Image (cartoon, rainbow, N blue to C red):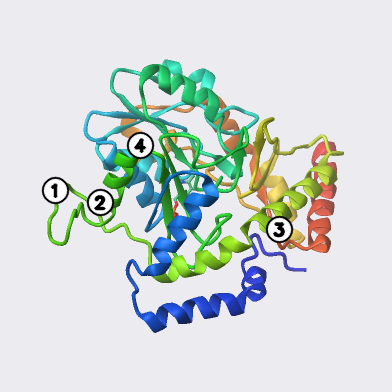
């Protein structure tokens, strides 16, 4: 049995006609850049998230860059984020000449621990950038409360949590700006690179739109610096089709996550992921913690089960950030999770039989790990 880690093929075959037609419509009108599908997608996404503005863009990395440029972040500024995330989050802060300031994660949600946030705020803090890792948002209520007290904007990196909810509101609608990614393997993915920004702030919306097209206000008039940050019309057309089935896919992801959690609950060697009260997850990943992660990973590989240890070297220990002066021991929760996490095969179309094989393989390996 070969089990895909993320199954994109089944979804494609299910909606192949719709995708093909959508692509053909773009080829027929030929408006490859900022064609009508781009605006239509932005309207649908803004409606889906429940905010006034959506700005589609070229990736979930560029979206973070655009958001921070719009907020005027640059040299000498500090932006607070977490060390346990994909590199983009801190990378874009540093690219603007600002300093990433890390706050440890909470060991249950694996997201920014709001209790550690206040201590990281200084007079130079210009933004707080929590991440919704593995599909559920950070405790945005608490983070927003602390940010508001200090008058600091909050950018939610929702590249993995798009579609999730916190206190009944959708991820990307929870703060000053929400940012997401449509990288193919994300919960809502396109067939290339893509991303989007969300805000209720009219002025920020205008500035982010302008930055997306080289800071251009009207043709050949550039009052501010920008980038080439547009989403391709083809990708927008593909996303419009995928968005139609997104909610039913989230339901399927939740059923699969429940099956994992039930199946693995009998093992003392496995700590399953925990969805926080007030939250729902889109299960970008189903990530367990286990003492001997590498032994489990190898045992699974022997049985044809792929697994991935994401962010095994947390950002504060990455060579590129050595100049920040952090050392091992600074963020014990992030380091523990980096050393002990294992993400299992997850997609809405993971078949019951394949999932049973994954669960059986884990249980068999876990037994020998405990007794060895
Ligand atoms: C994927 C991801 C990004 C970057 O998105 P791209 O579209 O690949 O640029 C940023 N932050 C997090 C947390 C991610 O998972």
Q: Quadrant of the image for the C terminus? A: top right
Residue that numbered label 1 is attached to: 223
| CB under 8 Å between discs 1 and 3 | no
Q: Nearer the viewer, mark 4 or mark 3?
A: 4
Separation of marks 3 and 2 at Cα, in angstroms: 48 Å
Q: Which is nearer the N-term, disc 1 or disc 2?
A: 2
Q: Nearer the viewer, mark 4 or mark 1?
A: 1
Horizontal and vertical percent position of residue 10: 67, 70
Q: Tell me, yes or no, whether the two marked residues, 1 and 2, touch with CB atoms within 8 Å.
A: yes
Whole-angstrom CA distance, mark 1 to mark 2, is 9 Å
Measured in 3D between alpha carbons, the distance from the residue under mark 1 to the one under mark 3, in whole angstroms, is 55 Å
Quadrant position of residue 227: bottom left
Q: Residues within 10 Å of mark 4 (few under 14, many from 20)?
A: some
Return the disc, 3 or 2, that comes first in the chain's sequence. 2
Question: Residue 225, image x and y in percent?
Answer: 18, 48
| Residue that badge 4 annotates | 321
- Considering depth in this image, is 304 or 182 the residue closer to the camera? 182
Q: Nearer the viewer, mark 1 or mark 3?
A: 1
Q: What residue is pinned by disc 2?
A: 210
> Is disc 4 in contact with disc 1, using a CB cutoff of under 8 Å?
no
Q: Which mark is residue 215?
A: none
**Residue sitting at 67 percent across and 73 percent down?**
14
Sequence-earlier tag: 2 or 4: 2
Q: From the viewer's side, name the closer residue of 114 and 154.
A: 154
Task: Write down the residue under mark 3.
Answer: 301
Q: CA distance from mark 4 to mark 1?
A: 33 Å
Q: Nearer the viewer, mark 2 or mark 4?
A: 2
- Earlier in the chain: of badge 1 and badge 3, it is 1
User: Which of the two discs, 4 and 3, labels the residue nearer the N terminus?
Assistant: 3
Image spot of residue 172 (x, y percent): 49, 42
* Alpha-carbon span between mark 4 and mark 3: 32 Å
């Amino acid at each position: 049995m070969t089990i895909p880690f993320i199954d994109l093929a089944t979804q494609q075959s299910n909606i192949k006609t719709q995708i093909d037609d959508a692509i053909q419509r773009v080829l027929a009108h030929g408006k490859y850049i900022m064609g009508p599908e781009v605006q239509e997608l932005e309207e649908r996404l803004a409606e889906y998230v429940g905010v006034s503005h959506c700005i589609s863009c070229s990736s979930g990395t560029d979206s973070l860059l655009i958001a921070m440029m719009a907020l005027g972040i640059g040299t000498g500024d500090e932006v607070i984020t977490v060390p346990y995330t994909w590199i983009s989050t801190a990378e874009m802060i540093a690219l603007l000449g600002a300093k990433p300031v890390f706050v440890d994660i909470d060991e249950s949600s694996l997201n920014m621990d709001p209790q550690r946030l206040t201590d990281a705020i200084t007079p130079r803090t210009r933004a707080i950038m929590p991440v919704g890792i593995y599909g559920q948002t950070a405790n945005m209520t608490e983070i927003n409360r602390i940010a508001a007290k200090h008058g600091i904007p909050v950018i939610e990196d929702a590249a993995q949590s798009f579609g999730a909810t916190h206190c009944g509101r959708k991820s990307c609608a929870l703060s000053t700006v929400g940012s997401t990614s449509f990288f193919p393997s994300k919960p809502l993915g396109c067939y290339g690179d893509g991303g989007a920004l969300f805000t209720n702030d009219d002025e920020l919306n205008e500035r982010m739109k302008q930055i997306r097209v080289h800071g251009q206000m009207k043709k050949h008039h550039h009052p501010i610096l920008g980038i080439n940050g547009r989403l391709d019309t083809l990708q927008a057309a593909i996303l419009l089709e995928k968005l139609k089935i997104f909610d039913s896919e989230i339901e399927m992801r939740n059923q699969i996550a429940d099956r994992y959690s039930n199946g693995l609950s009998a093992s003392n060697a496995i700590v399953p992921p925990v969805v926080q009260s007030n939250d729902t997850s889109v299960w970008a990943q189903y990530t367990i913690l286990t003492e001997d992660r590498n032994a489990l990973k190898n045992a699974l590989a022997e049985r044809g089960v792929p697994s991935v240890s994401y962010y095994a070297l947390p950002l504060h220990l990455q060579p590129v950030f050595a100049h920040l002066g952090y050392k091992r021991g600074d963020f014990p929760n992030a380091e523990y999770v980096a050393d002990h996490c294992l993400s299992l095969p997850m997609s809405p179309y993971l078949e019951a039989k394949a999932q049973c094989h994954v669960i059986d393989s884990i249980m068999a390996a876990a037994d020998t790990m405990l007794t060895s």
